[in-house]
Image (cartoon, grey):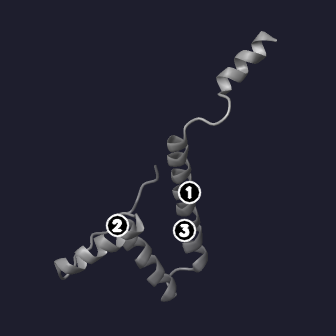
Amino acid sequence: MAKKARLSLYLEDEELKRQIKVAAAKRGVAATDYCAEAIEERLIRDGERSIAEGKSRNANKERLELLARMDKLRNEIGPLGVRTSDLVEQGRRR
């Protein structure tokens, strides 16, 4: 796992914190990821970060999310077709 940089964030009120958590939950992401994405979008808009940097990070994040969804679906659906071990065994019998 890559080492992540840490940033502490102090908010003025609890209501803002609650709104962030609710918004993150609606999107199925952690509050930390939600805030990091919002900050990154603002940096791009302010010209402090290039769009290419943001896109590569988002593309990798989307890829990982898709892989996680695929794993979840595989577990829900169960095995498809013939197991590899069965194919190997059949090949040995020939």
Q: Looking at the picture, how far across and down is residue 35, in whole percent? A: 37, 73
Q: Earlier in the sequence, mark 3 or mark 1?
A: 3
Q: Please give left or right for residue 50 compared with residue 24 in the image.
A: right
Q: Earlier in the sequence, mark 2 or mark 1?
A: 2
**Residue at the image position 50 percent from the left and 43 percent from the top:** 76
Reply above or below: 92 against 67: above
- Identify which residue, 81 or 25, lies in the foreground: 81
In this view, the residue in front, 63 or 47, is 63
Contact, CB < 8 Å: mark 2 with mark 1?
A: no
Q: Position of residue 51 (x, y in %)?
A: 58, 79
Task: Give the image location of residue 77, x and y in percent.
Answer: 54, 42
Q: CA distance from mark 2 to mark 1?
A: 18 Å
Q: Amino acid at mark 1?
A: Leu
Instruction: Give the residue at mark 2.
Output: 25
Callout 2, which amino acid?
Ala
Q: Amino acid at mark 3?
A: Asn
Name the image quarter holding residue 53. Answer: bottom right
Which quadrant of the figure has residue 54?
Answer: bottom right
Q: Is residue 12 left or right of residue 45?
A: left
Which residue is the site of mark 3?
58
Residue 66 is tagged as 1
Residue at position x 59%, y 68% in the image: 56
